[in-house]
Image (spheres, coloured by chain):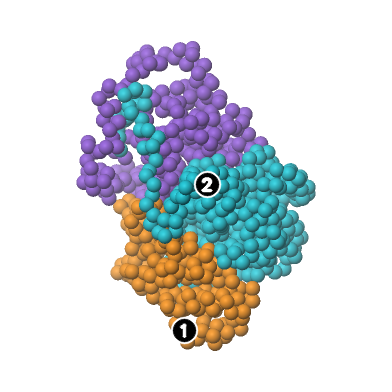
Amino acid sequence: MTTQQTRPSLDDPRIAIPSTSEWYEPAPTAQTERQAEFLNLRDGEMFINMGPQHPSTHGVLRIVVKVNGEQVVDLDPVLGYLHRGVEKLCENADYHQAICYTDPLEYVASLFCEAAPVAAFEKLMDVEVPRRAQYIRVLTMELNRIASHTLFQGWMALDLGGITPILWAFIERDEIVDMLAALTGQKLLYNYYRIGGVNGDLNHEFMSRLGNWMSRAAAQIDSNTGLMNENELFVRRTRGLGTLDQATALRMGVTGPNLRATGVPFDLRRDHPYLVYPELEFNVPTRDEGDSLARYMVRIDEIRESIRIIDQVLHEMPDGPVMAKLPRLIRPRPGRAFGAVEGPRGAYGVYAISDGTDQPFRMRIHDPSFVHLQLVGPLTRGNLIADTMAVMASLDPVMGGVDK
Amino acid sequence: MDRALASALQERFGTTLLAPVRQRFDETEIRVSIADAIPTLRALHDEPDFAFEMLIDLCGVDTGEEMQVVYHLSSSTTGDWLRVIVPGVDRSAPRVNSLVSLWPGAEWMEREAYDMFGIIFEGNRDLRRIYMPDDYLSHPLRKDFYLADDASRSPAAGVRNMERAGTPADATRATALRKSSGA
Amino acid sequence: MAMTRDPKKGLQVPIVTPNTLWTTDDPRAYGGVPLAQHPNLELARYDATGDGRVDDARWGGALGAIPTKADIVLDLIRANSLWPLLSGLACCAIEMMSTATPKNDIDRWGMFPFRASPRQADVLIVAGTLTTKMAEPLIRLWEQMPEPKWVVAMGDCTCSGGRYKRSYSVVQGIDRVMPVDVYIPGCPPRPEGLIYGMMKLQQLIKDRRGHWPERAIGPTVPDGI
């Protein structure tokens, strides 16, 4: 490390700033066949690097785009700029700490990131979660889903160039998130779910804010949505863009709203039910077109379904404890468990292996955004550079989960 | 717990399974050898009785003695998750066949398994590192890759913090790995 | 932190163990090249000769403590119109965006335009975990920002590595790679916290503290770390 007095000064005219050609690394050598294909430039093609820092606010993703003029020929996303080594850290922490590490993965929907490992650990421990805790979990997860989808709306507009919807989306999201802050103490990384229940019962502040919000929710969502749905620019830019058909989607491992926009009604809440979803009435919205607009519309419909679910949960919430009686030291028997929840982006799953000690032996986190980012290449081929962002926004990735 | 699924799997694949079909809660688990993995998955995908069209997850596991590749599948015919474990991957030279021919979406999941464990997937046309920089040398999730514990500063000095297992001789990583039965 | 009881005073004192795992005397450090000949420190060696410190806008020495009227006005302008660089890396970026939106409006202090290009930005608010792979692009961004520039470390991960203290791929605090003016703790810090930090930065600018008056580049981590 250089010491205080040897810091060079930029004012000196004799310092030679290297020319821009030296700032950049030489072209990478291809390590694999696919990369060799990608790096092979034909006549008229060039690379554009949408580097790890770019205004599209999905996080740090680097996309190397091979363009012919304005048309995208091929795409190579480079990940890893936010890889924090969460799986390794979880192996060296005990079960409660492991849940805390998973929060910041999909940070806009962090209750789902906690729900999956908690479900897996509860299977390992063979713990029955009290009914009230299950209802509270469903309630908070649906609130988080609405917050995430509202944010998706704003981001999608921001990536297409509109500034107003994201400001409106954040107003909406701030209301929900303040509600959850009154309940959990945190606005973003809630750390609310525990193995066997939740950390603390509902309180008066939360219930009054929730009631307040529920009375206005549907109207507010409609007005926010109308801002974008009725905007011709938005519709014309997203209609027919990045069409994904059913067979490809299934072959690519797509889940969640992206899959439902192609017509496959796969929803973990229906097909692999967990918590109290079997007792709740809700529809699984699907669309058939599979383009960006369909993916957007599916999420809007999901917001409305979530409001319906919250309504039912509030009416049917039983009394009782919110935490099961568990020993302080969580030490499950050796075994394996897979717990998955339907997050706002898709199937968020955790595969946990226990070796009988108080630390998970392996905690594999499956994030849906990771799988969906593979689609950016095939879906953008042939479109313009600006459509890269539109397609990515419609797939709604969150780089925290992609990079773990 | 779908008993019909377990018996159907046992009937169809019984000869190639390395262990009986296990079920717990809503998960069904089968073990196949490295050579049988892709044919089994292809059969699970194509045959209408099983119709496991959705690949949910592909991951690697390092048990300390061997490595495994674990697939999680989902089907519209059953409410169970199907877990296919391919054990017996050699830790010093891990090679398995790639799933990309069946599910192109497995490409990045295999890249991640390669990056984290060093498992080579034959048939994956893009097997390079995905999380770590390209010139990184280790594979972080292997059990012989130790985190930089502040071992010199903590009173536990590198031993797992909450639990001191039995006698001091037990409190080593090798023992903990040996104790993991069937994992 | 490991604590023990000092038997003489009966107080709890921390156990401080020097890091003996790796030191800069190790011949394998820095790619095997001794620091005195390391090519990356060309500029540092040049600056050590003292030939480069030409100060054209300020008087040197003790006279540098007397700000002129122009300096006061310039500092006011800079403080009230800080344009941040969009460098949201992870979760703290959401809180940063939340600060920019109507509920906690940072536009009241003139900081709404989050510039995408570093050439147009004044302050680099590093919001989110800095990983070793991202460190190089971030430092490049910071170097591309024209002076005067300030750095705000938002969130626990940028202050010290945060909850990723043991991780193999996280930089343990961005002050290991760039000089930081304001540290804002929190995981994530509330928007009010970020606003408080930015107001502190404005105060630093007006008092001409922080790193810019020295107009130097390079990490300012003191010896012995």
The tint of chain A in the picture is cyan
User: Where's the N terminus of chain B, which quadrant?
Assistant: bottom right
Q: Amino acid at mark 1?
A: Thr
Residue at image position (37%, 33%) is A19
Specify the chain shown as orange: B
Q: Is residue C211 visible?
A: yes
User: To which quarter of the image does residue A290 belong?
Assistant: bottom right
Dot 2 and dot 1 within a common chain: no
Residue B110 placement (x, y as % from top left): 45, 64
Up-down: is A339 above or below A102?
A: below
Identify residue for label 2.
Answer: A68
Label ID, residue B16: 1
Residue at image position (32%, 42%) is C9
Residue A21 placement (x, y as % from top left): 38, 37
User: Where's the C terminus of chain B, which quadrant?
Assistant: bottom left
Q: Is residue A151 visible?
A: no
Residue A305 placement (x, y as % from top left): 73, 58
Specify the chain shown as purple: C
Q: Chain of mark 2?
A: A
Label ID, residue C131: none
